[in-house]
Amino acid sequence: MNLNMDVKYIKGVGPVRAELLDKELGIKTVGDLLYHFPYRYIDRTEVHRISELVEDMPYVQLKGQIFDITSEGEGRKKRLRATFSDGSGWVDLIWFNQIKFVEKNLKCNKTYLLLGKPAMWNGRFSIAHPEMDDAEKVNAMDGTLQALYHTTDRMKKSALGSKQMQDIISAALEMDKTPLQEVLPQQILMEHDLMPLDQAIRVLHRPTSANLLAQATNRMKFEELFFLQLSLLQSAKSQAEKNAGLKCERIGKYFNDFFHTYLPFPLTEAQKRVVREIRSDMRGPYQMNRLLQGDVGSGKTIVALLTCLIAIDNGYQATIMAPTEILAEQHYASILPLVEGLGLRVELLTGNVKGKQRKQILDDLKGGSLDILIGTHALIEPTVVFKNLGIAIIDEQHRFGVKQRAMLWSKNVHPPHILVMTATPIPRTLAMTVYGDLDVSIIDELPPGRKPITTLHYHELDRPKLYDGIRYQLQMGVQVYFVYPLIAESEKIDLKNLEEGFVNLEAAFPEYQIGKVHGKMLPAEKDAVMQDFKQGKYHILVSTTVIEVGVNVPNAAVMVVENAERFGLSQLHQLRGRVGRGENKSYCILMTKNKLAENTQKRIAVMTETQDGFVIAEEDMKLRGPGDIDGTQQSGLPINLKIAHLVRDVGVMEKARECAKKILQLDSNHTLPANAVMWKHLKEMKKESNFSEIS
Ligand code: ADP
Ligand code: MG
């Protein structure tokens, strides 16, 4: 089959429809068309009764007759309305477009099999633009699964809906029966028991059984994810080969002394595993580029310090970069006492460090008498010159971009090893994919002795009960956070909510001091309020999400999240990590309006049921799609995914990744004849997605 043929030559398409397909869906060739997969299938054997319809149903089939067709309105407002019944009840059918055509073809007293999405309107169900088939003809159709295709409003207006897409694709498949050329090597098809491409494409568009459809879907998902992984692994490999590593083979005095004498607690198993992974990277021939994920409080700092010590043992300097001054100061304050006994020199460099002090630090850094430099992005400035930087550690990756990472590289003639740390939990396979060029380590275990946080869901109606609880906590001397959402598009309204909440709280708790922070305040003002809260000058802190990641106020054991329905799950999880840090039993109370959509109800339930950041991240992505993760769009990948889903198809992804790894090992020079078509296909796919690699 000639996949490069223009779609206009397909029977039933022509130049006008071809232009529409191109403009609306980017479909130019037969190949594009065949890779426009159905988004779902309707089981045409399942027919509902009208009396069974309830609100929020997806597409349903009804079988019955039309009684009475009327047209309403004039000109562009004109619409056609018909009454449809199967004997158990009535629904209204409505058409806004293609009225003449429908009017001419619809007949009363004929039995139709109708397909459409019912909506409740004035106490009665109505279906707009149903697909109407002669019931007898449908019974004679082979296969019972009907494919549904995405189309756009403009296409529907021009009578190019799902049904017509199906007809066009069928015509294309009929036109040329020579099989599509296989793009996966035979070896892979056999090993993974995959359906050949030609069959899979035909089955996907015209399934004859659910079983075959499942096999075809699996095959296409595998294909997509395989090419995605092949592409990612290939760039990671060429990247690594470009950058030979600074060999850190020695485990010496500093690491060992610290480990045996100064380590303040035994490492968790997860911390030990991660340190081993880092050691083995730094000892190897290539530059380390590793992402370290660990939930809030999982103990990433000590891992960072051990990593610094490995570099120092091998004669190099180390640096740790944090996204804010508060966090940089916190790192400095926790690391300084740990390494003092080792005789190492640690300094803090932020925008606040000026004059003589700054000059001294910069001189010592250049001279080599400074071992560890901790700071903010002030570290990137050209005036900051290391004598011999061996490792750069970046905390809270989601606030720094790839660019900043690259700038740290240039701090040594030889790029230093890089460790990126993040508390944003992302499932491992997804991380492998969105941070394609980074290896991933995970701390999936919290240090022992952590007290769980009780998370409760309260509705607006429960507010009196909430205030009673808060009053009790305040009397016990516990401090409380009230967090409000702040979303850029409606900042003014959000801020008003926060101000109103502040006034209400002042009225409800007149005997207590209440502080307020939000993003419109200057950093210094914010810092001052945070410090006052930390010192107990305020009992309640009203804030937007500006409460910094990682900031520690152990006496604040209660957090109330207002309008919790407006937060993402991962964000709620991060916020919740602010409490549960001290002696008191901790609570997180999620306030929502009284009536919630089903999906929202589910999301809140995830929060009350688990405290595991990875479970939450996965649920979040299942409910919202991975597009929201870390601002990384599914569409930002080197291969556009049309059928596979980064989260739901994790199992297939893992197999595809292993398979791609093997291919890269066995055929690193792209010379095996069996893989020729595969390499060519990879090239074409990469071109299509306009992915520009960052190097
Ligand atoms: P995060 O991963 O959020 O940066 P931190 O490194 O700040 O977490 O660690 C959180 C707290 O847990 C710190 O007070 C740290 O001292 C403590 N901690 C870390 N690892 C352990 C451990 N293995 N056993 C006991 N406490 C630990
Ligand atoms: Mg941290």
Image (cartoon, rainbow, N blue to C red):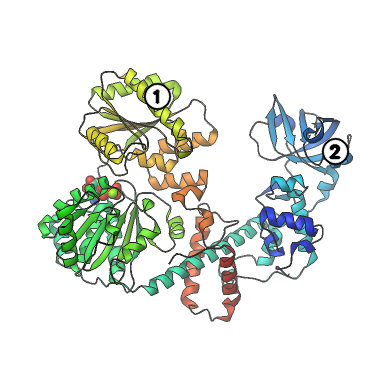
Horizontal and vertical percent for residue 18? 75, 58
Horizontal and vertical percent for residue 379? 27, 57
Q: Amino acid at mark 1?
A: Glu
Is 99 placed above or below 634 here? above
Residue at (23% x, 24% y) in the render: 476
Judge by depth and name the residue closer to the eye, 536 or 436: 536
Q: Which residue is mark 2?
A: 111
Residue 211 left/right relative to 45:
left
Residue at (19% x, 69% y) in the render: 315
Is 377 placed above or below 110 here? below
Quarter of the image that includes the N terminus: bottom right
Residue at (52% x, 78% y) in the render: 670
- Residue 447 in view of the camera: no
Q: Amino acid at mark 2?
A: Thr
Q: Which residue is mark 1?
A: 500
**Which of the 4 quarters of the picture holds residue 22?**
bottom right
Question: Can you tell which mark lies on residue 692?
Answer: none
